[in-house]
Amino acid sequence: MAGGVVDGGPAKRAHLYEHKFTHYFAFTCFVGALGGSLFGYDLGVSGGVTSMDDFLVKFFPDVYKRKHEHLKETDYCKYDNQLLTLFTSSLYFSALVMTFFASYVTRKKGRKASIIVGGLSFLAGAILNAAAENITMLIIGRILLGGGIGFGNQAVPLYLSEMAPAKNRGAVNQLFQFTTCFGILVANLINYFTDKMHPNGWRVSLGLAAIPATLMLLGGIFCAETPNSLVEQGRFDEARKVLERVRGTTNVDAEYQDLVEASEEAQAVTSPFRTLLKRKYRPQLVIGALGIPAFQQLTGNNSILFYAPVIFQSVGFGANAALFSSFITNGALLVATVISMFLVDKFGRRKFFLEAGFEMICCMIATAVALAVSFGDGKELSKGSIVVCVNMIFTALVAQLFLMSLCHLKYGIFLLFAALIVIMSLFIFFLLPETKQVPIEEIYLLFENHWFWKSIVGQRDQHQVKAAQV
């Protein structure tokens, strides 16, 4: 079942929602979306920094030595160093731990509080990384960066979802992805120029992460709290005023009432994790909390983006050429994100998932073939060497194991990613209903009318539901 339009009754008033475009709404969402730039900038800048000779000489001399022993070999096993990959994955392990704290703060103190804490943590980590003189300072800085990402990734997407009108929620949510991609692109460009700034270009790259951190911090300070959060905190009059301001109309009775009823239902839940295990919430657990976050990382895209400069160098690119090639690759990522922002609310999330899966399968197979040809000269490789929560678990594991897997499995790792993408696409095709233009408060209705999930979740109430294909 692709979507739903409902008649009357509590939490079924979406057809009565009104909204107009307001500059206030645009400002709050854009500033909130800047949180994505934190994750994007770090993803892009760290991968480039790990390929810089000046950085390797100071912190990882063994890797630098292996890298330059056989300059003509296409051997990315030179980078297979667990301490080097710890530099990468420590951020994600930190983000995983901080996610649990972020969840509490976001729920009890509001989305703004988490955004502010995330900005402060990331700012401190950026400063410490830029000033690092030893591995300890480097890792502690990464842990602080991870704390910022843990809080930001918890609060910012939720902030955007709650501020966005139901009909435009897909495009607004894409702002987070857009700023993530933009952060990666900017980081690649900065790395390209700082690689020529010997011997401290890497300090400039890492230190400039303070800019998106500062923007996120300012966004948390000056943007309004979401109406949903205000209702949860019992600040009802303030919640209605913010809702009227962000929607550009005083006729918000239907949406406001849905928020109040959804909040009352949520507050009646005494054990969220135990509640999530109930049959009626099985789709949210399987799809939203486990499936999609895990597949997002198991496709390998984030690790490939992170290690892109290393991979380009391994197949024969020079240091600067590898960094610039990564810039071009991420430029394509940014363009694709912009396209999806304008089309996601027209075609729906499910179709975009499936189309992206097909593209990724083709790209992974093409990459495997290209690397197989690259290693066809006989040279031997070295033989040595809850939603946000699940996302960070797999991000950390894949980041920590990627280079080692690439070293031992060679191009086979990309075929493995392709196979996982096939599984992901089947998962989406059979189990994910379309949520286009469906308010958050009415998502459960899609599962009650889905060919598979309806036998598991049953009917929550007796109101009649009209299912509509989209």
Image: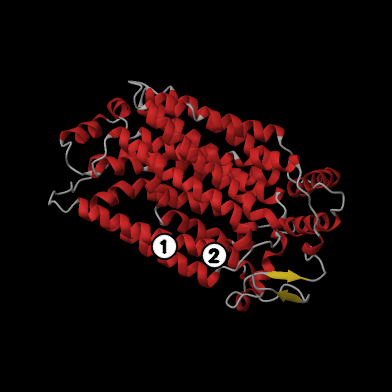
Q: Residue at x 71, y 32 (%)?
A: 222
In this rendering, the answer to whether 272 lies above or below 281 is above
Dot 2: element = helix
Q: Which residue corresponds to mark 2?
A: 351
Which disc is residue 269 wearing? none
Residue 24 x, y percent position in the rendering: 75, 40
Q: Is residue 7 left or right of residue 221?
A: right
Circle 1: residue type: Ile
Which element carries disc 1, helix, strand or loop? helix
Residue 117 visible in the picture:
yes
Q: Position of residue 160 (x, y in %)?
A: 66, 47
What residue appears at the point 51 percent right and 67 percent down from the top-left corner?
A: 428
Q: Residue furthest toward the left? A: 378
- The answer to whether one can see residue 411 in this image is no
Q: Position of residue 319 (x, y in %)?
A: 29, 34
Residue at image position (54%, 37%) is 148
**Residue 106, position in %: x, y?**
65, 44
Decide: few, some or many residues near mark 1? Use Cα within 10 Å; few <14, some 14-19, many ≥20: many
Question: Which residue type does callout 2 highlight?
Answer: Lys
Left or right of 272 on screen, residue 60: left
Residue at horizontal 12 percent and vertical 52 percent from the top: 378
Closer to us: 276 or 6: 6
Q: Which residue is mark 1?
A: 421
First reached walking from the N terminus: tag 1 or tag 2: 2
The Cα–Cα distance between marks 1 and 2, rounded to whole angstroms, is: 15 Å
Residue 254 shown left or right of residue 397 in the figure: right
- Check if mark 1's residue and mark 2's residue have beta carbons within 8 Å: no
